[in-house]
Image (cartoon, coloured by chain):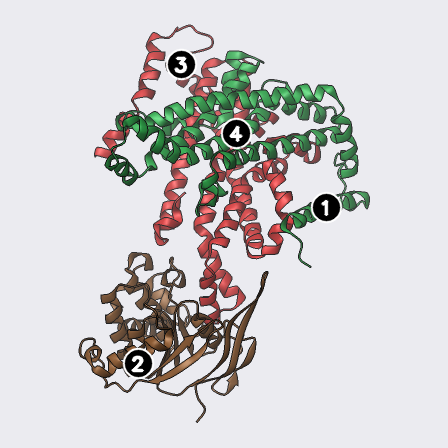
Amino acid sequence: MKLSPLLRGIGGLLVFVLAWEFLIQSGMIRFQYLPPPSAIAIAFNELIATPTMYAEMMHTIGAALGSWVIAAMIGIVLGAALGLSKSLRTYTMTSIEVLRPLPPVALIPVALLMFGFSLKTELFVIAIPAIWPILVGTMGGVLSTSTRLREVARSLKLHRSEILFKILIPAAAPSVLVGCRLSMSLSLVLAIVVEMIGNPEGLGYAVVREAQALNPNLMFAYIILIGLLGVLFNHFLVVASKILLPGEFRRPNSLMGR
Amino acid sequence: MVPIFELEDVSLSYELAGGARNVLRNISFTVSDGEILTFCGASGTGKTSLLRIMAGLTRQTGGTANFRGAPIDGPANDVAIVFQDYSNALLQWRTVGRNVALGIERTLKGTELKDRVMDALRLVGLEKNVNDYPWQLSGGMQQRVQIARALALKPSVLLMDEPFAALDAMTKASLQDELLNIRDKTGANIVFITHDIEEAVYLGDRVAVLRGTPSTVEQLFDIALPKPRNQITTRELPEFLALRHQIHDAIGGHS
Amino acid sequence: MLALANAAKGFLPLVIAIGVWQYAGDKESALFPPPATWWPAIADLIAADTFFPALNATLSLIGLSLAAASLVGFVLGLVIGTLPGFRHWTSLVLEYLRALPPPVIIPLAVLLLGYTMTMKVSVIAFAAFWPVMLNTIAGVSQIHNLTFDVARSLRMTWFETLSKVVLPATIPSLLLGIRIALPQSVVVTLVVEMFTGESGIGSLMIAAQRNFNAAEVFGLLAVMGLFGYGLTAAFSGLERAILRRWPLSASAS
């Protein structure tokens, strides 16, 4: 009998967890601070009954999503402008290419210097790097709207506003969304990082705090929670864009497949 | 004398989710030494499946298929295959020369290998392109590389699966003549699959027509046209036109 | 020449921003030190013999971790890519681990392995191996069935098929994976260095911030910008050199 792929995935997860439990319980691997999954499950159960955890989670989600919204507004406007105007590209692209590879975490000391331990530090460190994928996606989307499609538009005698709303925006939408999705995942990662190193609040700090308190069960429970949040952040926009762009998913070589 | 290929009552069906799909039924024919046998049929008549059985890439589900008197069990030593889709059949990161060497580099080394590769490339007129990459060449040239790779094996049989179907008409005509030339020089037996009736008649000593779902050999035609064949005069012969008509009717007659 | 001139034009916003900062900004600002003060701050670090050892530590950590990540990612990718059943069994575990922000495992790794090189390399490699593995899996699955038929019809052995067909066919995907993994390994390296405060540019940056040495913070930020740019450019060059044999479409990102 063949199991469906999802059932096999669940089976694989069970094997992974059971093997971990077995290796610890049987004493085959022994780390002082590596608890078995059963202990983590108990800690996780307690964690989700703890009200302060929800405050920490809301702080992290708020920082990540708030920065993402700021980044999306800046990235889409700048990306569209760069896609439409050749001279703007000429006079900025090198600067962007030089700034883009700057490792985002290098901004943490600068932000701490300017804003100290505050939400502003988080927003600064998350939003700036989160602009790039959206900017690049939007610019690429507008640019790759092939000249042929623009010629079709002109031969149909469409107005400039019609070209913008009927051709350019729908044609660019998939790659804008890909950029938004990448930057949403990035936002969560950076929120966790900046909370670990910079602003001591939220889920990122909670992991560090529990580790320093030598409380591995609770630390693992927080890590599991952050991973679940990561899955949510990864899939939210895929699901959203399936609703927004139903045709894109049935097209071969769709950008949204991965 | 033992025939090259002897197929007896061969059938093929696949198990699919929606039930079995029958592709071939009661296929029987022989290929004897020295002939070009072409298979002609509409798309979806299992031509490629039949060739894959002869190549040892697919197992028939019924009947017997023998190569030189022994049951076919995997790709045979002196049988070479030329696929239609040259871009996936060639390794794009290897030069033309190293693509041609692919099948013989295990057994031959040094100058012997180099000479064999150059001989094969000379047969298809690509000796100057030995250091090019396939993706730098036109479709017709890439298909020539694939033919050279097959010839480098010095096969006694060439199995060709619609090798010229993706090429333009002029390239196709010149490759057809090259193929006939190569056959005269090497003496290889050729089994050639096509959906182009004129190509089947022009190249073949015999033409087998596949028809139906699941398909079977509808009719076998002997092609008694004078050799060497010529793209203009052969195609103008009344016999050529008559055969074209008969095969067209045998295939299914529409259009 | 035209391309070069255009590239120079593209520098304008950056040059103007730095110029305005230098000449219109507050020379005594504790938070926004003018760019001219950045270099002396770095020169002080060099004179104190801390800068180059730190740069060296950071570079070797990145190199070592990226090499480990590429090796593990490529091998796992080949295994998962060639065994279709395996892919389904591992799908949920991989999906979850991939979504986990890599830096959260730093506190865990510190608890288990202590402040060791093994800890640092494992954490950074954990972050960097995903893109390598996922791209390798995609690369293997992109090999056409017909290409495997060719291998069979030429009577290649399993090992020949692996070494002559599968490995070279997946090299463009491997390089694409490493190109994506490179900036991620830089980021996680800096996070590890900032978190442990032991060595490397990351620890220098955090130390400068704690001492409120703004010129040094900005100087190191500029260094990291150049560093990131140089690393990306160097890898692109390497990738182009390797991919000369592959058709253009294979190297498209």
The colour applied to the residues of chain C in this rendering is red
Task: Pick the residue in front: A131 or B98.
Answer: A131
Q: Which residue is mark 2?
A: B183
Front of the two marks 1 and 3 = 1
Q: CA distance from mark 1 to mark 3?
A: 58 Å
Above-or-below relation of A183 to B92 = above
Using the rendered view, name the quadrant where residue C19 is placed. Answer: top left
Whether marks 2 and 4 lie on the same chain: no
User: Which residue: 46% across, 33% down?
Assistant: A177
User: Disc 3 marks which residue?
Assistant: C37
> At which x and y percent is residue A162?
32, 29
Q: Earlier in the sequence, mark 1 or mark 4?
A: 1
Element on which disc 1 rests: helix
Is disc 3 in the same subunit as disc 2? no
Left or right: residue C235 versus residue C80 is left
Q: Are marks 1 and 3 on the same chain?
A: no
Residue B161 visible to an observer of this rendering: yes
Q: Residue furthest bottom?
A: B1
- Colour chosen for chain B: brown
Badge 3: residue crowd in 10 Å (few <14, some 14–19, many ≥20): some
